[in-house]
Amino acid sequence: MILRHLEAQTLTQTPVLKNVVKEVPTVQAKTEEKGTDNKIESKALSSYFRGGQMVHFEGHHCSKSDFKVKKEEGIPCACCGRLMMTNNGVQNFERKAIGAKGEDLQNLLTVNMDYFRGTEKAVVNFLVKTSKINPNLTMKGLLTQYSPNAKSLLEEEQRNVLAEVSNKASVLGKDNPVEKCVQKALKDIEKSTDEKHFERKPFLKKLVDATKDMEDKELAGQILDSAVKLPMSKNSIEAFIVKYAHGNKEDRDIAHRLAQTAVSTAEHIHPDTLGGPDHTANYVAECGDCNSKRGHMPLEEWMENFPNMPRSVQRNIDEVTERIIKGNLGSRYDDYPMDIQATMNRETGGIIRLKVKNPEEIQKAREERGLAQPEESSSHH
Ligand SMILES: [Zn+2]
């Protein structure tokens, strides 16, 4: 449990999120402008929703896997606004990446550049660059080639973090339990080989145990806050290279890992854990990266942590509407933009008011462009 908490903390420490958190006032300011009435209303709303009661949703019942929007290639994420890949897109990318080298590899990575996020994008840029110097190496080969270098940088960073932990714990006296963990970690780093290296998670687990009984809870917290800065493949290019250069990781695994944060998923607007139904009116397409960061946050908290969301969800619905007009999603989705407008309006107490087309306007747009009325899709239940 505590370890899970630690992982969540680490996420909020990535620079991207730090900036995002700083920008929160946009949404907060809007809430304040609205005056007391809305505050009471939003309180009532959140207690209602947080109570986990079922909420009535327009739209159609739909399992996550049947949600057609996430099967459209190149839709912007409803949360971060970055382009998303479908599951098929990810599989194609993996297939093409197996054994690819030289210009083929560089082209494959470059044409997909818009899809990659954060650390993954940094790794992709690194692969493009190093592939030009080593045109005979595949992704796995490149990571292996540069892993000694990455490993020494990673270890330097690990030692820095451990020194900070040790420093914080120094008031506990010589040979304190925290110091013992640190010394053991330093030994593991020194002895590490390609196949067996120092691991972050077990170390953090031991450190949590070591600080559990400390009287000074604030200091214990500071020690753990320092320790979670240990780099991991999610936020460090060096940790990524070291992790994927060795063991049984192959081109396919590397490609999968690079693309998976961009994969389009069905996100419950009202979390399912809080009574949100499996319903087209309760789904937006969101990238794997945002989906895992949001977890089960209620919408209010989600907006505070992701201030781009209101803009992104509008971009998302605009692009989805375009696909609906073209007939890609079947006629049952003609209501979808209005359903999402209603859901967002209700869930945010009127803060997010989307501009959408109603079914008549969608139909009109089809006629103007000479497009056929799509057939009703049968994959709905
Ligand atoms: Zn996203």
Image: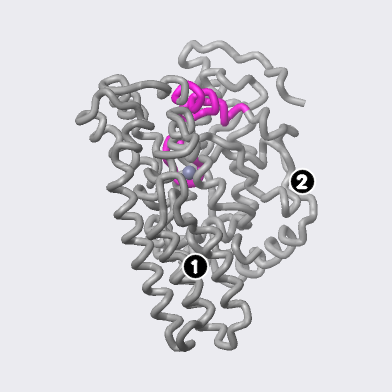
Magenta region: which residues?
Answer: 68-93
Label number found at residue 63: none
Three-letter code for the amino acid on which mark 1 is drawn: Glu
**274 and 375: which one is in front?**
274
* Rendered position, 176 above or below 313: below
Instruction: Using residue 167 as the reference point, say whether residue 47 is left or right of it.
Output: right
Q: Nearer the viewer, mark 2 or mark 1?
A: 2
Label number found at residue 56: 2
**118 and 191: which one is in front?**
191
Q: How many marks?
A: 2
Three-letter code for the amino acid on which mark 2 is drawn: His
x%, y% of residue 85?
Answer: 48, 30
Question: Which residue occupies 38% across, 62% down?
Answer: 158
Instruction: Using residue 214 as the reference point, say whether residue 243 is left or right of it.
Output: left
**Residue 189 among magenta residues:** no
Residue extending farthest to the right is: 53
Question: Which residue occupies 49% across, 67% down?
Answer: 33
Give the quadrant of residue 324.
Answer: top right
> Which type of secondary structure does the marked residue at label 2 adopt?
loop
Label number found at residue 33: 1
Q: Are marks 2 and 1 in contact (CB under 8 Å)?
A: no
x%, y% of residue 64?
Answer: 67, 34
**Residue 72 among magenta residues:** yes
**84 and 107: which one is in front?**
107
Residue extending farthest to the front is: 191
Question: Which residue occupies 52% across, 30% down?
Answer: 320
x%, y% of residue 94?
Answer: 46, 25
Question: Which residue occupies 37% across, 43% down?
Answer: 241
x%, y% of residue 20?
Answer: 41, 58
* Rendered position, 179 above or below 135: below
